[in-house]
Image: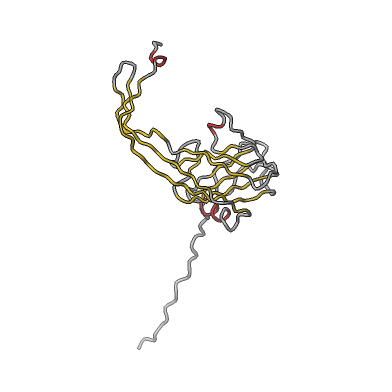
């Protein structure tokens, strides 16, 4: 009889190490357990209004007839700094939406300049966020429900970037790593409603827009 032979086990293969995603890096570094200050919950009510809109050109011809957003779900969110020490930059992260922003301070709320910025502030009292329930350019995405927003205040310098974020600072002389900083957690509860308005809104070209070129 042929003697029994034990089968040789196949050698173990090591699975390729996967790098943590940007979202994982952010969640590992910006969460309630890492935050050094916890602020009170802010409650915000915001609405989006829809209405039928008819648009006409200079000849009175209808160019568009459809339901449009006539009131966008935008709102200003003011977050007070934990102290009155002057800070040089802030990094803002919303755990709910994944949106981030790294802004060099001061970036004051002036016309034109502020329109291109999601976050503005004097670099001392705190910051103002241009919140938006809908993802859009030049606004910070904040959804309905509870948003855990984390703000990291940098007092010594403005880092060029934050691990896990594609945002970079506008300060050309930014240091590579900030050491004097504090992470603050701002819970924000957003109540969101949509409303369909009655009637038709008619929009005609203004006389100045219809002048012959």
Locate residue 86, reporting x and y percent: 69, 41
Locate residue 164, reporting x and y percent: 55, 49
Residue, far bottom: 1
Residue, far top: 212
Query: 158 or 87: nearer the eye?
Result: 87
Residue 80, placed above or below residue 19:
above
Left-right relation of 75 to 196: right
Q: On the rendered image, what quadrant is the C terminus found in? A: top left
The residue at the point 65 percent across, 42 percent down is 158
Locate residue 42, reporting x and y percent: 53, 48
Query: 37 or 112: nearer the eye?
Result: 37
Image quarter for residue 122? Answer: top right
Locate residue 57, reporting x and y percent: 33, 19
Query: 168 or 147: nearer the eye?
Result: 147
The residue at the point 31 percent across, 31 percent down is 52
Tell me the colour scheme of the image: secondary structure
The residue at the point 64 percent across, 43 percent down is 159
Query: 91 or 25: nearer the eye?
Result: 91
Left-right relation of 206 to 141: left
Q: On the rendered image, what quadrant is the N terminus found in? A: bottom left
Residue 172, placed above or below residue 151:
above
The number of discs equals 0
């Amino acid at each position: 009889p042929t003697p029994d032979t034990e089968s040789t086990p196949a050698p173990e293969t090591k699975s390729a190490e996967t790098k943590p995603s940007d979202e994982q890096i952010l969640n590992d570094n910006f969460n309630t357990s890492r935050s050094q200050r916890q602020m009170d919950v802010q409650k915000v009510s915001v609405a989006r209004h829809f209405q039928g809109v008819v648009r006409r050109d200079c000849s009175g011809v209808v160019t568009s007839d459809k339901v449009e957003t006539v009131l966008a779900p935008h709102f200003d969110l003011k977050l007070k700094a934990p102290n009155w020490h002057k800070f040089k930059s802030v990094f803002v992260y919303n755990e709910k939406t994944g949106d981030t922003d790294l802004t060099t301070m001061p970036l004051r709320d002036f016309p034109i300049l502020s329109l291109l910025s999601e976050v503005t502030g004097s670099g001392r009292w705190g910051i103002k966020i241009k919140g938006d329930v809908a993802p859009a350019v030049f606004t910070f995405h904040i959804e309905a429900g509870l948003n855990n927003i984390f703000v990291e205040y940098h007092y010594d310098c403005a880092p060029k970037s934050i691990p896990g974020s594609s945002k970079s600072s506008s300060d050309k002389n930014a240091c590579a790593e900030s050491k004097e900083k504090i992470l603050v957690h701002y819970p924000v509860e957003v109540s969101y409603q949509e409303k369909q308005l009655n009637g038709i809104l008619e929009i005609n070209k203004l006389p100045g827009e219809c002048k012959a070129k």
